[in-house]
Amino acid sequence: MADLLTPAEVAPFLGTEAVKGDAGFVDVLIKAAQELIEQITNRNLDAATTYTEYHDAGDTHIYVDRPPIVSITNLYDGAWPKGSDAAREITSSDYVTDSDDQCHNYRQGKIELCNEEGGFGGARLDAKVVYIGGWTKATLPADLRQAWVELVCYWYNAPERFHTANAEDQVPAGLYNVLRRYVLRRNA
């Protein structure tokens, strides 16, 4: 689990004295809220970590599994030119990402080839990307962080909501609307 939110950060919203006696319970609520937010948004709230992924080649773009993209360490595709056994390293001047889109796409994790690159060469799972993906405490969107805090507080003050089966019943409508803005959609 990510350490993007701690009981100490929730304490001002619950009252410091309440959290001192219930820090373990608050931590459980933070982790449960994280899991529910991940379920609703179809994305992980992992702290920025290095990932290596393989994707199908043949298109001009790929989507990584753990957006947002913080940085790309290496990008390769297979069998370039056709018939070659050597992988081609794609330089940073030959691709763009949605990392700097000012959150217009809520950072969907798209890597797109540019500069007259035809497409990722190779076949199935021949495109390899090594990247740092996920949020840090500094880059986690403020409204998403606040919704996470408020969900923990909501469950702390109304524990019966914590155990309901339906996600919509566990999350107040206003918070649910914030979370829906971060749903990870994959449009090819």
Image (tube, grey):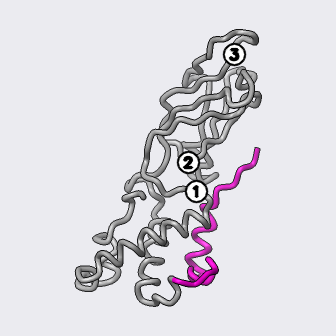
Neighbours of disc 2 within 10 Å: few (<14), some (14-19), many (20+): many
Q: What residue type is labelled 2?
A: Pro
Residue name at image x 58 percent, y 56 percent: 43
> What residue span does the magenta drawing correspond to?
163-188
Q: Name the residue under label 1.
A: 43
> Which residue, given by chain and number where applicable, does mark 2 sit on?
67
Of mark 3 and mark 1, the one earlier in the sequence is 1
In the depicted view, which residue is nearer to us: 139 or 49?
Answer: 49
Residue at the disc numbered 3: 79
Q: How many labels does the image show?
A: 3
Q: Is residue 84 left or right of residue 9?
A: right
Q: Do the residues labelled 1 and 2 touch (CB within 8 Å)?
A: yes
Q: Quadrant of residue 181?
A: bottom right
The magenta stretch spans residue 113: no
- Is tag 2's residue or tag 3's residue first in the polypeptide sequence? 2
**Please, is residue 185 above or below residue 177 in the view?**
above
Q: Does the magenta stretch include residue 164?
A: yes
**Relative to 179, 6 lies left or right:** left
Hey, what amino acid is under mark 3? Ala
Helix, strand or loop status at disc 2: loop
- Cα–Cα gap, marks 1 and 2: 8 Å
Element on which disc 1 rests:
loop
Q: Which of marks 3 and 1 is in front?
A: 3
**For residue 172, above or below residue 62:** below
Q: Which amino acid, by three-letter code, is at mark 1?
A: Arg
Q: Position of residue 167 (x, y in %)?
A: 61, 77
Q: Which residue is drawn at 68% across and 31% down?
A: 125
